Amino acid sequence: MAPILLWLIMFLCLLISVLKYLMGLLLRYSFPGSKIKKDYTWQPTVSVLLPCYNEGETVYETIESISKSNYPAEKFEVIAQDDCSVDDSYAWIQKAQQDFTHIRIRSGRNAVNCGKARTVCNALEHSEAEIIISIDSDCIFHPDVIRELTACFAEPNLGSVGGRVGVRNPNDSVITVIQTIIYYSAFQLYKIPENWTRSVCCISGCLFAIRRSLMLELEPQIRGRNWFGIPVNQGEDRFLTHQTLLRGYGTYINNDALCWTTVPNTLSVLFKQQLRWRRSVIRDLFYTLRTLPQHVWKLHPNTVLTLVLTPLGAIVGLLVILTMLTSDPLAWAGPAPLITYLGLAAVASWTIGKYSPRETLKHPLAFGAYVAWSIVSTLFITPLALLTMDSADWGTRTKEPEPAVERQPEPQEVSLGNASH
Amino acid sequence: MHKSALTLYRIFAVIALYAVLLGILSYAFIMGFYAINSTWAAPVILSASDEKSLDFISKLVTSRQTIEDLKVDATRMQSTLTEMTKHRADLVALDPELANAIERERTHDRATGTELSALDTQKQTDNRNTQAMLTRSQQTAARIRKDLAAGLITKTDADTQLAALTQAQSAYTDSRIGEVMLTDSILDKTNTGTKSMDVLEKQAELRSEIAQLDVTIAVSDKELQEDNRQIERLHDAIAAAKLSPYYLSSTGNTRIYFAFVPYDNQANAKVGAPIYDCYLDMVLCRKVGTVKQIFLGEQDATHPIFKTQVRGFTIQMDLSHPNSAKSKTVFLGRKPLLF
């Protein structure tokens, strides 16, 4: 009975995933009306919150890209908050503050390292803008980004808006090829049906816009997140999206709001990143199950299914893979999965090359390695995530302190300096 | 409360993580071990009710039944063949007799035909003379009627004389009939008539029947030989089948133990080679018996670990620990990990 149930859940998860991709394709090309009606004339004030930890020079590039925004300079500001980086990140923030004087950049530093979520909240304390945009400090942003995100808020019931995250380094390695295809298909297809019902379940923290009022309402919850008393610093993007939906607001991803991130190009970094994400997914599943009555009545069925079945699929997938490896250990090495992934890679590569030339893949067939990665991911990451839910480690930003960097004598909160225009 | 839950969670997580790690390492080790090990064999417990055994026994019974059917068929065919051969011999013996009879008749005809031709010529001359005399008898009849009218003779005398003339006419007609019949008889004896044709047809039929019998006998003989060969082949097949583990398992009174050996491990499968059974599939091994017999017939089996189809053969094990027949694998020749 149990194996049948497992396979049933797994089949349901796969079916819904495939249906979502197909629906995404259908909606994208047949129902352009499902897209949001943007109003570019509405130009609210915007605070771009930039939490930063051990990014080094990249944070400078990030601020530089934001400084090139075509949004009216007097309408937005950048609030960069360093989370006690052990490298020279803060120095680069200050350099950006000095170099890009045509926009308002404020910088600050946490008293103690407290993670991304709380760093965003710290930055928020200094913002008075109508729209809050939280970004990652390793991304490069398109000049249209702020304009595209704010234009969506013309729809009154929309609480949060995200942008599309592209890959800056698609051809670094096999791993980046895989991620490029996954990112592209997720944003361009998988999330489209969620967009249709204004119920995107997870807006990427790389580019997350939210109404100030809603953010302020959620701030105490973000600060108070904990796992049996241990502060939770990860997955604030999923948490924020989820809470937005629970409060009756819509969520949306505007694929015209583009940013580019550097994805992990080694297996160990990818593993750590995926482990962190999987913890967020599982944490969110527990939260969803705990508040299921609320979900069932408040949320769109599409959202409930995604919130429940996506993480459940990860857990059930683990059991299914375990069963498969004991009953038929070499099944995964058969030609069917490889041919399927190579076929998908060919189609995805052609599409990416046509519609997003910046992400053009030199060796798309490397996506065949996804057969092995999907097994590793299902088999190792889910149990590890389940057993390390108490970990607060970000995983991909750890650095040894740089002796050459001048550190302040003791960590203390640095007041935000204002850079005048 | 939180602290206790967290402590419990962490204890559980550490234990589970180590268990997972151990499981992964064990799994990887087992996979690697079976990928390179060349001494394993997979015990197989055969019983008469196994699908393969049932299939085997069914085929064996069918083969035996086929032999019986073929034997009956061959016996019947042999009888028919003997009968046909005898019949042919009779027909062959009849043929020269018929030929002799025909020849004798021809010789006789040739002799009598010449004589009858001479008689026919004589008869024709006689008939011509008689006809001339009968032509003159018309004048005689007219004179008799004239003499009667003149009262020279009595009516009785006239009737007597006229009757004599009529009788002579009738005799002439009979003579003519005889001549025609004689001519006909000569024709029969000097030429090939329908009667002769009938006899020749009979001779041809006789020879045709002999030829047909020859063909039938040849075909039947071949069929008989083929049946005999088929019987021999089936006997050979049954003899070979009796060396199969399925035959042993289905007919033996004592419990017999078998194991599947992949071709990769063939070098270690020798009669008398020791067999080891191990705990956890590969460690703490003990000798549990020896290889008793090797069956050369190819078998397919599922790899006990990789679950792929593997080609190999079967061995019979002489087990001192019968429970080892239920192990997933045993090892031939030596312990797999030296302990």
Image (spheres, coloured by chain):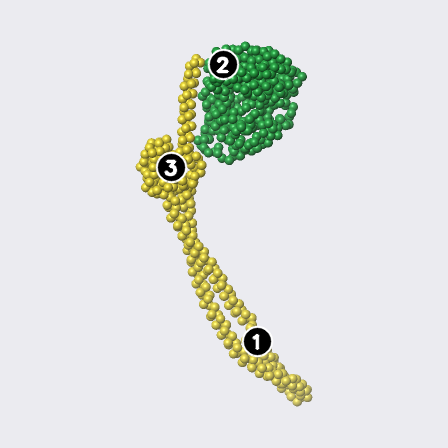
Q: CA distance from mark 1 to mark 2?
A: 153 Å
Secondary structure beneath dot 3 equals: strand
User: Label 2 is placed on what type of residue?
Assistant: Arg
Colour chain B appears in: yellow
Q: Label 2 lies in what chain?
A: A
> Which residue reaches farthest bottom?
B152
Q: Are marks 3 and 2 in contact (CB under 8 Å)?
A: no
- Which residue corresponds to mark 3? B40
Q: Nearer the viewer, residue B150 or B47?
A: B47
- Which residue corresponds to mark 2? A407
Q: CA distance from mark 3 to mark 2?
A: 64 Å
Residue at 44% of width from left, 31% of height from top? A326
Q: Label 1 lies in what chain?
A: B
Q: Which chain is green?
A: A
From this view, report whether residue B244 is shown above or below residue A404. Answer: below
Residue at 32% of width from left, 34% of height from top? B286
> Which residue reaches farthest left?
B320
Q: Is residue B148 visible?
A: no
For mark 1, does the 10 Å Cα neighbourhood hold few (<14), some (14 to 19), or many (20 or more) residues?
some
Secondary structure beneath dot 2 equals: loop
- Which residue corresponds to mark 1? B187
Quarter of the image for the N terminus of chain B: give it: top left
Image spot of residue B100 (x, y percent): 48, 72
Q: CA distance from mark 3 to mark 1?
A: 102 Å
Quarter of the image for the C terminus of chain B: give it: top left
User: Label 1 is placed on what type of residue?
Assistant: Leu
